[in-house]
Amino acid sequence: MKSALNFLMASKRCEIAGLHQLALTSELVNATGRLVHALQRERGLTNLYLASRGERGGAERLAQVAASEALQVEVLARFEPLDTEAEQSGYRTRLFGRIAYALQGLAALPLLRERVQTQAWSAARATAAYARLIHALLSVVFEAADSAWDPDISRHLVALFNFMQGKEFAGQERATGAALFATGCADADGQQRLLRLIESQEQCLQVFADFASRPLQLAWQQAQKPDTLATLERLRRVLCTTTPGGALESHLSQAWFDVCTAHMDAMKSVEDAMAAELLSLCKRRRQTAEEDLRALEDLQTRVPEAGALVADTAFFDDAPASPGLPLMDLPHQAASFGAQMDRSILEIVRDQALRLQAMGDELDTVRSSLNERKLVERAKGLLMAHRQLSEDEAHKALRQMAMNQNRRLIEVADAVLAMAEVLPNPSPR
């Protein structure tokens, strides 16, 4: 008959297998971040190229396309080791669905580049197309964070996702501003979009600050160069305060692109540090779990009866009679179990249960940020469908309702979704 210790060891083996998959997922996230960064630069150069009617950024764009293609090969290779066996991967359903969608977008990327090269598409259409693809790739990171069951790893992934999302908003700002400068004319819609993108960056970076480790927070502070920020703010003011329809100096498109690129490169250095910290955490977690398993196996070998549970009313106590030993400390204390068995297997089982409960509670806290984002996105989609709004307009409407009602954005989004059942079906556009 299988003992409690048998099931503890099985639990630990499952944990090790899960940590292995989390490590593979983290490597995929790292590679995806590099590809996203390359595509963001490609998008910015594409805007320069199209908005200037091929006069600027042509050669640089082609060189960047080659760099992006090389990174795409790396990302595709990272998909291969992921365990896609249905019976083992049910909890990753959404992650694999996001990967499938991203693969579809990557397959269509050569067609997008062809339209750009022949200048068949406008800068606005190309920007939207790149944004859709990058969103698909970032959704892979989002689902990786949402499917991670270790709270520390999930916390790192939440911080990383929000930082990457903030950088994507910075990339869209670079592309939008480059197009405005290159056309030489201020545009009210473009100005409103810039303001929303700046606000969205700040929100993402605040979530990053809430979840990132102290060393990473300091790294981000140090990466921001005062001269770069000053130039960026000056050019932002030019773009956002020029009267709609007024002239913009087209030669500033390159200066804008360069300062935005410097800002995003600084963000990329922090993103790389976050990815390295994440991989290191996954490695440490797995090493600890493997040490725990070896300690349990050693205990079972030396004391075969250790797995037998003795009837004990201590099971019903609110807390163990003794202080309790975290399972992660077993490698250092296994001898005491084998020699004296002062501590019953019940206490080991209870420690594992308490540890898993604590992990679950912390994980719920970490995931609240992701759940809020899901609700806001769903509310935006509802407004877009029922009021025929663009994504920017839907976001602006939610923000305006929040300000008018003096409520948090998530509260307004929840109220909008609560009305979904009583709203008529949206009419086709």
Image (cartoon, helix red, strand yellow):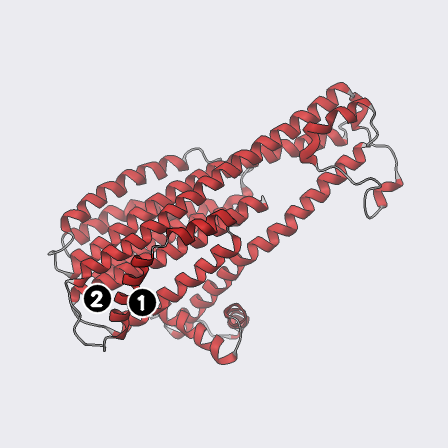
Decide if residue 121 is in sight here.
Answer: no
Residue 421, numbered circle: none
What whole-number distance in Å separates the C-alpha atoms at marks 2 and 1?
Answer: 10 Å
**Residue at x-position 32% and y-position 53%:** 264
Left or right relative to 373: residue 316: right
Q: Which residue is mark 2?
A: 180
- Residue 221, image quadrant: bottom left
Crowding around mark 2 (Cα neighbors within 10 Å: few <14, some 14 to 19, many 20+) is many
Amino acid tagged 1? Leu
Left or right relative to 329: residue 425: left
Decide if residue 195 is in sight here.
Answer: yes
Above or below, 49 relative to 198: above
Q: Which residue is mark 1?
A: 194
**Residue at x-position 61% and y-position 34%:** 14
Crowding around mark 1 (Cα neighbors within 10 Å: few <14, some 14 to 19, many 20+) is many
Left or right relative to 416: residue 357: right
